[in-house]
């Protein structure tokens, strides 16, 4: 008989495996169990680093992902040591309360939402629901009924890169804890607070700054907007992929701002438009202060 | 017996159906047969509009997609008339040389590369291979060993929106005529010339302007680059997703330019970086001339 570590798991039909896999499914399961999955090395590593207190995040981000109370369980295959030795080493630093289990390929695949698993899955605690976004922020991205998980994740990743203070999402936006969105954030989910189910009207009323609606039909063109204006504290509203922002949502904005289309393209994907809007603000804000 | 139009096709195993489906497969098949697929209403519509001479494109774009010689065959389901009446009407304007066939759902699905077909597929002629990109352009995006079909398509779509004169791709870049890339361009493939298999070194040597390498490790920060500099004629080089640009490719550039990362994100997806770079140049170029 071969030696086997205690946690080595080989049965894809085991109850524990099923319970993890369920977290990749319906939103209701995640919210009832107050857990979700961070799959793949980028997302899992940032969840683990948050748990270990290794991320230099703001206080409000640490409120979402508190050191010592972020990760519940970690599953990985022996290939992780080869594909990602740094992350593999990090697992040894996790305290004993976190269940760390080595599994076979077929077990990790059974847990995974991805077509091909990426050697590691972390089960992460959903953040406490009572956090409220501050009205004093420099740059905020608002996901307003965004439906595509990949778009939501990509905008969160770009907002992180652009140094946004936070993301807010309105009630009818896709569940950002679904595995596709988490993967698309490439770890950025753990870098800034994402406030979900926010009432847009009351938030923008309190916000100390300007509200810009990203709107292909807007009467203000982004390239005609002065850096001094772009440099002010700003919330950008990004609307539903098919229908954009509705009248009520547009009425929350001070200006409807269009990304100029110089060629023949009829429109931009919402995550492409968000990239241009968030970075235009961030670069104006940062270069003004430098 | 019900009345059936002559072209109604119901057998997914028919020889014609197989021949169309093969174009969604290996690059070698497309290049041998000199045809590819434009799937879905956005791509098919722009191919058809190019064929009908309805697109206001540059002479070099018209060289790629000549009126009367762009589309070979069109297949659609009866649902197109409901989902996209404007495009459905356009089919009636196609000359008799273009084979237009109404098919059953199962036939169109058998032809399609997509998980769910979108009611229309056009078989399009590959452009003549002898076109050479001009050294006199204002804005050019270069795909340098980009491997992901979606990234390639998204950059082509953004380049179109940013009003770029053309796209060039180097020999080891993904085949831009594969169905995933074509779909990701959302019709933009037919709006600007995409020169494939271009020798990077000789192209940049001839180019009358500056060469910027998009490079996360670059020593020039995009937000520190003056609009007067960004406003000059520019080729942007975008490198491989995993490995970026190699030393030889970097040596083709006048500057290695990094998109600033203000938050904790370690990197940007190449198509996100390309969006920021191309739009920064385009906005500087256009606002300078207005």
Image (cartoon, coloured by chain):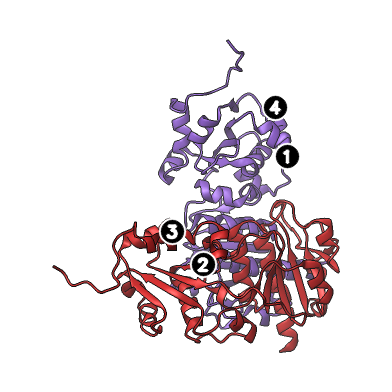
Chain colours: A red, B purple
Instruction: Count residues near mark 1 (Cα–Cα under 10 Å), then give few for <14, some for 14-19, many for 20+.
Output: few
Tell me the chain of label 4. B
At x 28% / y 69%, what residue is drawn?
A8
- Secondary structure of the residue carrying tag 1 is loop
Residue underneath mark 1: B54
Whole-Å distance between the Cαs marked 1 and 4? Answer: 14 Å
Give the answer, above or below, for where B150 lies relative to B56. Answer: below
Q: Nearer the viewer, residue A104 or B128?
A: A104
- Picture quadrant of residue B90: top right
Q: Compute the Cα span from label 1 to label 3.
A: 33 Å
Checking the image for residue B92, the label placed there is 4
Marks 4 and 2, Cα distance to the nearest angstrom? 51 Å
In the image, which is nearer the foreground, mark 1 or mark 4? Answer: 4
Q: Earlier in the sequence, mark 1 or mark 3?
A: 1
Label 3 close to label 2 by CB (< 8 Å): no
The answer to which quarter of the image holds residue A101 is: bottom left
Residue A219's image quarter?
Answer: bottom right
Closer to the chain start, of discs 4 and 3, is 4
Give the label on residue B172, or none.
3
* N-terminal label among 1 and 4: 1
Discs 3 and 2 share one subunit = no
> What chain does mark 3 sit on?
B
Pick out the residue farthest to the left: A1
The chain letter for the residue carrying disc 2 is: A
Q: Which of the numbered marks, if any, corresponds to residue A81? A: none
**Foreground label between 2 and 1:** 2
Q: Quadrant of the N terminus of chain A?
A: bottom left
Instruction: Tell which tag, 4 or 2, sits nearer the viewer.
Output: 2
Residue that carries the numbered disc 2 in the rendered image = A36
Same chain check for tags 4 and 3? yes
């Amino acid at each position: 008989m071969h030696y086997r570590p205690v946690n080595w798991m080989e049965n894809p039909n085991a109850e524990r495996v099923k319970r993890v896999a369920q977290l990749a499914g319906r939103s209701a399961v995640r919210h009832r169990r107050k857990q979700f999955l961070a799959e793949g090395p980028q997302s899992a590593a940032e969840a683990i680093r948050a748990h270990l207190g290794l991320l230099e995040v703001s206080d409000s981000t640490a409120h979402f992902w508190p050191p010592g109370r972020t990760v519940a369980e970690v599953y990985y295959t022996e290939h992780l040591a080869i594909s990602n030795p740094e992350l593999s080493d990090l697992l040894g630093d996790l305290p004993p309360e976190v269940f760390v289990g080595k599994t076979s390929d077929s077990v990790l695949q059974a847990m995974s939402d991805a077509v091909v698993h990426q050697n590691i899955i972390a089960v992460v605690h959903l953040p406490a629901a009572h956090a409220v976004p501050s009205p004093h922020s420099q740059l905020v991205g608002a996901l307003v009924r965004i439906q595509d998980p990949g778009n939501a994740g990509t905008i969160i990743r770009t907002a992180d890169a652009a140094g946004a203070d936070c993301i807010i999402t309105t009630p009818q936006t896709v569940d950002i804890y679904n595995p596709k969105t988490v993967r698309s954030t490439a770890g950025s989910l753990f870098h800034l607070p994402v406030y979900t189910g926010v009432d847009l009207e009351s938030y923008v009323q309190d916000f100390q700054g300007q509200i810009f609606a990203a709107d292909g039909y807007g009467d203000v063109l982004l390239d005609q907007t002065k850096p001094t204006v772009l440099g002010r504290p700003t919330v950008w509203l990004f609307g539903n992929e098919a229908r954009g922002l509705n009248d009520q949502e547009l009425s929350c904005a001070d200006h409807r701002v269009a990304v100029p289309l110089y060629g023949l393209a009829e429109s931009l994907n919402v995550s492409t438009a968000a990239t241009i809007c968030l970075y235009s603000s961030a670069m104006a804000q940062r270069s003004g202060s430098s």
